[in-house]
Amino acid sequence: MKDSFAVRAMEIHDRIWDQEHVARVLDFMAANNMNTLILHANDIVDAVVWPAYYYGEKNSNQTFYEHYKAIYKKLYKLTASRRYMPVHRRDYLHWVIRKAAGMGILVFLQNKELWFPDYIQEVHPAVCKNGHFCCSETFWLEFIRVKYSELMADFPELGGVITSPGSRESKLSVTSNRCECNSCKTLDSSEWYYQLITAIHEPIHQAGKTLVVRDFVFDSGSQQALSAAMDRFPADIVLALKNTPHDFYPTFPNNPKIGEARQNETWVEFDAMGQYFGWGIGICSLVRDWQERFRHAAANRVCGMVVRTDWEGLPGHSCFDTPNIVNAYAAALLAEDAARPSSDVYRRWLVAEGLIAEGAANAMIEECVTWLGGIFDRTWDVIRKTVFMDEYVFSDSSALPVGLEHAFWLAEEKNSLSDWHAGKDKTLRGTMENLGKIVVEKEQAVAEVRELLSLLSVNRGLSDSAHQRLLEQFKYFAVYVKGFGLVGQIAIMARVLAAQPPELGNLRQLLQERLKELLSHAAGVEHWLSSKELPYPVFALLNPERMRIFHDDVAAKIESWQ
Ligand SMILES: [Zn+2]
């Protein structure tokens, strides 16, 4: 029997208001049998709901334009921009939902709570106490019920809402509450989550739609409070989990919460673009990794998969602009059948994107699939040895760290692997043994990407233009790997030097040489960037400014250790 997922979803974050991009994503989904489009913006519900109730319209069952007819003067007087912003965004979303429905695709909105318009402070001034928003105000629960009632009345064709209640990235949450009123001092986090989710769930449930709750929290205390609340949720709430704990780090084990839910359905989220694996500038096919993770999810009663195509931190960039689009094809095919071989993914990608040479016979297509699939299957190993350090996250969301402390803070504190992997707590310590291992890792990455570039140089079935474009993209990739490799080597050498082991030998001199190499690499990249028209994400990831600031930080430290 096939391990298939009932919900096969694609998520857009950055470009939800870009109709051409949305149309492109819908075409991809329809062609690849995906059935759920997720539009993600922290404020998306507030962008399309006033709510009219707070402008004097108490009947939440009236239509949007009936409300508008009654309150346009008040809107203009009290909050001029809320007169037209929700109108046009609401009409736009209706256009997307209709277009998607015509292709058999259901639309969900994804947001963070609490979110609210500034005008709410005027409606109910007690939400603010001593200059801080107050989490304990029960008014929030009324506001949430009103907001979602109006949303449900206006969008009867929506599939539902996906929300993150525990994030610091919302406008107000119990995790970021700074109010010091007596109620807030004794506020029970788990109870707060429960009340909030119940208030969102009621109108959505009444409308016969689905509420999905994400466990997107930043620390283990918040996670426990949210987990305790989740145990009490009504059975029709769906839980969404990232495939790895904390964030999308492919070196991490499967999220241990997959399979834990007793009564609620679970969806699992994947990232195709690669916030933490090179954005597609560092090219990274996760087809083989995902075969295992999809099988694991299917074996643990997961019924939905979500693939994220972009990251809101990067304006105008998505997997649709890079070779990492191959991960989107992997998600679509593995969602239908977790046992699909990787050659199926590569064939679908090459044919659907029109990359094969015109008129190629089947045998030629198969040769191209084997050749390019073989190259792409090895990219993850290069990225693993580049932006990770012995599996630890060694990047600032794929960009270079800007100093020695920054590098190890990212690896050991912010994105700590050892929280999830017991054997890994000593591997980044400043010992000669660790140094040897990490230097080899970085040198291997450089050698491997060069080998891939050479394997790619003889075209075996791509159209000339596709071949030239891929060669160019692998050249950026190689430059990226080299810069990261130098920074990684310098970081571990400096750490060992700071620990002053007796067998230090010529480490100081070696470190000085690597620092010189980094400066010269930065100068080369600077020259190269200024001589070419390159897309912004290439510029951001190869940024020589970051190499120099890292260099200067380490050079100053070596001076101080004399
Ligand atoms: Zn308070």
Image (cartoon, rainbow, N blue to C red):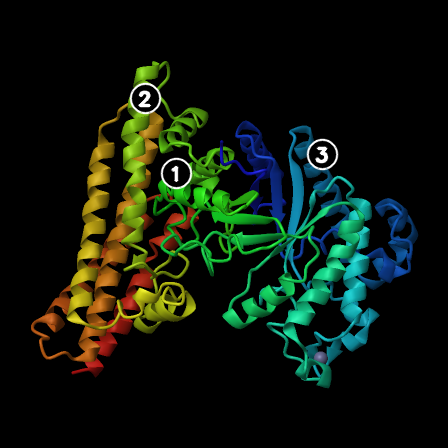
The disc placed on residue 323 is 1
Camera-nearest residue between 430 and 47? 430
Q: What residue is drawn where x is 67% and y is 83%? A: 185
Specify which label sits upstream in the sequence, 3 or 2: 3
Camera-nearest residue between 25 and 229? 229
Residue 409 falls in image quadrant: bottom left
Give the residue at mark 2.
366
Apparent side of residue 506 relative to residue 191 in the rendered image (left or right): left
Relative to 237, residue 31 above or below: above
Specify which label sits upstream in the sequence, 3 or 1: 3
Relative image position of residue 417 (x, y in whole percent): 37, 64
Which amino acid lies under the numbered mark 1 shown in the image of this protein?
Answer: Pro
Relative image position of residue 80 (x, y in whole percent): 79, 58
Relative image position of residue 292 (x, y in whole percent): 40, 43
Q: CA distance from mark 1 to mark 2?
A: 19 Å
Which amino acid lies under the numbered mark 3 shown in the image of this protein?
Answer: Arg
Q: Residues within 10 Å of mark 2 (few under 14, many from 20)?
A: some
Q: What residue is drawn where x is 23% and y is 38%? A: 453
Specify which label sits upstream in the sequence, 1 or 2: 1
Give the residue at mark 3.
98
Relative to 201, residue 220 above or below: below
Tell me the element at label 3: helix
Q: CA distance from mark 3 to mark 2?
A: 39 Å
Asked whether the beta carbons under mark 3 and mark 2 sit within 8 Å of each other, the answer is no
Which amino acid lies under the numbered mark 2 shown in the image of this protein?
Answer: Glu
Mark 2 CB near ligand 1 (8 Å cut): no
Residue 79 falls in image quadrant: bottom right
Asked whether the beta carbons under mark 3 and mark 1 sit within 8 Å of each other, the answer is no
Mark 3 vs mark 2: give the one in front.
2
